[in-house]
Image (cartoon, helix red, strand yellow):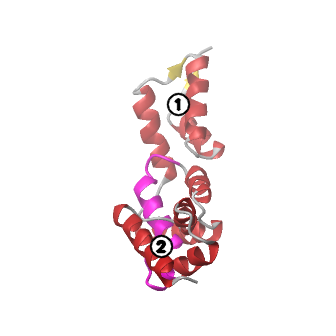
Amino acid sequence: MDSDILRRAKLRAIHLLEYRDRTEKDMRRKLQQGDYPPEVIDKTIEYLKSYGYIDDKRYAGRYLSMRVGGKGRRRLFMELQQKGVDPSLAQEAWMEICQEEDINERAAIRRLIEKKVGERTRLPRKEHQRLLNYLARRGFSWEDISAELEENGIKPEG
């Protein structure tokens, strides 16, 4: 293996990390775009991990803590999985965040409902369905959505 190519790959990787934290999958993809041989990419990833420059669990923790207020756990986990974070690491990061911060998905649903409908409790059927779909797309469970709507007395007209 050419040590000059390995050195350039490491410098490229560190340069990429200057802008933002990355998952291992993302870093591999970026290095592959640079046409580095697979063995060079593996050595570079190994190097980055050995110094803690790449840590998918840390990435997951930061990602979750920044986005937890506006999205549900299911949606956040799906996004992390798409970024290449192992589901078990995402779960560990979630548990740590839940211990550090007071995470309440029902409160997040309540805030989003207030933002969308204000003080109204009766909504046209179409608007009520849109609200349900909106909250579901944000990754909240049907149980939590239904409970919050019932608790706040929000029902479709008719």
Percent x, y of residue 98: 48, 66
In the rendered image, residue 11 lying in the magenta stretch gets the answer no
Which residue is rendered at x = 43% and y = 84% of the image?
51
Could you tell me if residue 45 is visible in this image?
yes
At label 2, the amino acid type is Ala
- Please give the range of residues in magenta: 47-71
State which tag comes first along the sequence, 2 or 1. 2
Farthest top residue in view: 158
Q: Please tell me whether mark 2 or mark 1 is closer to you in this view.
A: 2
Helix, strand or loop for disc 1:
loop
Q: Residues within 10 Å of mark 2 (few under 14, many from 20)?
A: many
In front of the other: 48 or 148:
48
Crowding at dot 1, Cα within 10 Å, few <14 / some 14-19 / many 20+, comes out as: few
| Residue situated in front as seen by the camera: 3 or 96 | 3
Does the image show residue 48?
Answer: no
In this rendering, is residue 85 above or below 51? above
What is the magenta segment's predominant secondary structure?
A: helix
Disc 2, SS: helix
Q: Quadrant of the N terminus?
A: bottom right
Tell me which corner region of the image, top left, top right, bottom left or bottom right, holds residue 158.
top right
Residue 59 magenta-highlighted: yes
State the residue position of label 2: 9
Q: In terms of depth relative to the viewer, which is nearer, 138 or 100?
A: 138
On the image, the x and y values in percent for residue 81 come to: 62, 59
Identify which residue, 1 or 135, lies in the foreground.
Answer: 1
Q: CA distance from mark 2 to mark 1?
A: 58 Å
Question: Could you tell me residue 6's position as x and y percent?
Answer: 50, 79
Q: Which residue is mark 1?
A: 153
Q: Residue at x 56, y 16 (%)?
A: 124
